[in-house]
Image (cartoon, rainbow, N blue to C red):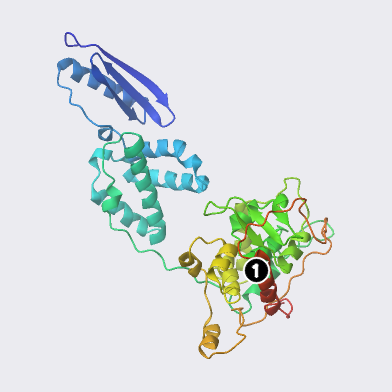
């Protein structure tokens, strides 16, 4: 060690790796983070030697950090505060498995991210790649603004892939009846064994029916609690929606009918099941019904497209559906050609774009354990809809009468 130089190296275990801090008399301390303890010790020893010999050159953290280490810290400090924390954690783990996570930040070139983009495009869609690049970009920005990482964001210089075309999948003739038929609760034989056909999750049928009647998202339905449902007032309050704002949903007579026949659960939730259970049960029912490329979220497209012709005021419709802009609302409105032709011909009384064939009615289970004629919720929800929420319910009632099916189940 050089004369007059006092150096002290300290290693600390952090949730995102090993942090080394070297303190020098009369000089700013030096710190660096590493993925394993051996690398941290080696760097500390080498740096102490350089300082003692008087050849140490100041470097930024980006000379030692990798994207993988930044992601570790981001997952611990930033991700838990987000609404989609679980999904984002999975996406971050997938990014860390790619070679891009092992490159030192100081060595990043646009070609590195371009190679990552092209590798991912061979596996997933352009929209998925853009979501991953947005996440990587935010990791870089947080590191630069809050953690002292001295580097520019290389994602900003990258050419992005094209987004996927907006989905416009709606029910084709006969598909709604077939799907509802497959969502009926499965029956058991005398030994208690499920008979073939139907769905073993008894909540799936009312869940899908309520999605079609209200245009609510799957997450909103699963988060709905009885204390926020006011059947006499024909409304339900959603506290935490996708866009971060609460909203009131008008409940039509069909929606109230399904809700009133659901049994109360000790958890207080209207649908005490998980998103993964809904995903699997819906996919299996759609496959049995012969529906190709039909997802649960497509029910929202279907519901909005049925409501739009009757609720012609886009502001009122956005209050019902929970869209913050008419641009996003337009992505969910998919009229069929016959409806548009009727408008061009000047026909009056053109009704909503229901499937061209009539659909089967699946009645709620009248033997449900807890039937309630009007009201499941002990508390009333304050009205938050502007310009007359009751009028919206009336319009929905008219819509449901026009779309009321009359045929029976497919055999």
Q: Is residue 96 above or below residue 55?
A: below
Percent across and percent down for residue 398 are 69, 76
User: Dividing the picture into quarters, in which one does residue 199 lie?
Assistant: bottom right
Nearer to the camera, 345 or 265 = 345
> Residue 262: x percent and y percent?
76, 58
Residue at screen point 50% across, 40% down: 80
Is residue 6 visible from the viewing direction of this image?
A: yes
On the image, which quarter does residue 346 sit in?
A: bottom right
Crowd class of label 1 (few under 14; some 14 to 19; many from 20; radius 10 Å): many
Q: Residue furthest front?
A: 387
* Residue at the extreme top of the image, as rendered: 3
Q: Is residue 228 above or below residue 25?
A: below
Residue beneath the point at 55% across and 87% down: 342
Which residue bears the numbered disc 1? 392
Q: How many labels were placed on the picture?
A: 1
Which quarter of the picture shows residue 104? top left
Q: Quadrant of the C terminus?
A: bottom right
On the rendered structure, is 175 left or right of 198? left
Residue 185 appearing in the image: no
Residue in view at x 41 percent, y 65 percent: 164
What x and y, as percent, mark residue 400?
69, 74
């Amino acid at each position: 060690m050089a004369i007059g130089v006092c150096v002290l190296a300290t290693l600390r275990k952090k949730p995102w790796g090993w942090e080394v801090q070297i303190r020098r008399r009369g000089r700013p301390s030096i710190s660096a983070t590493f993925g394993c303890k051996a690398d941290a010790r080696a760097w500390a020893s080498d740096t102490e030697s350089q300082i003692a010999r008087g050849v140490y050159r100041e470097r930024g953290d980006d000379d030692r950090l990798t994207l993988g280490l930044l992601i570790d810290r981001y997952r611990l400090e930033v991700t838990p505060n987000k609404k989609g924390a679980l999904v984002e954690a999975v996406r971050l783990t997938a990014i860390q498995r790619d070679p891009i996570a092992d490159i030192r930040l100081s060595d990043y070139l646009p070609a590195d991210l371009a190679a990552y983009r092209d590798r991912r495009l061979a596996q997933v869609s352009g929209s998925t790649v853009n979501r991953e690049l947005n996440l990587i970009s935010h990791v870089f920005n947080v590191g630069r603004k809050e953690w002292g990482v001295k580097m520019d964001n290389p994602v900003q210089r990258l050419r992005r892939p094209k987004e996927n075309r907006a989905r416009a999948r709606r029910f084709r003739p006969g598909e709604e009846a077939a799907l509802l038929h497959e969502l009926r609760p499965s029956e058991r034989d005398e030994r208690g064994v499920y008979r073939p056909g139907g769905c073993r999750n008894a909540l799936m049928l009312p869940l899908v029916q309520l999605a079609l009647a209200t245009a609510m998202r799957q997450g909103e339905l699963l988060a709905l609690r009885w204390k926020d449902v006011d059947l006499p007032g024909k409304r339900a309050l959603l506290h935490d929606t996708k866009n971060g704002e609460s909203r009131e949903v008008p409940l039509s007579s069909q929606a109230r009918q399904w809700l009133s026949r659901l049994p109360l659960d000790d958890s207080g939730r209207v649908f005490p099941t998980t998103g993964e259970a809904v995903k699997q049960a819906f996919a299996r029912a759609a496959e049995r019904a012969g529906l190709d490329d039909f997802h649960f979220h497509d029910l929202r497209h279907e519901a909005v497209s049925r409501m739009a012709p009757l609720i012609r005021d886009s502001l009122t419709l956005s209050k019902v559906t929970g869209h913050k802009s008419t641009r996003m609302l337009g992505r969910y409105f998919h009229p069929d050609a016959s409806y548009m032709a009727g408008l061009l011909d000047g026909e009056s009384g053109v009704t909503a774009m229901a499937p061209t064939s009539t659909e089967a009615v699946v009645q709620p289970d009248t033997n449900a354990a807890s039937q309630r004629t009007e009201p499941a919720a002990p508390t009333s929800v304050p009205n938050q809809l502007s310009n007359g929420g009751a009028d919206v319910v009336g319009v929905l009632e008219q819509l449901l009468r026009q779309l009321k099916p009359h045929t029976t189940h497919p055999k």
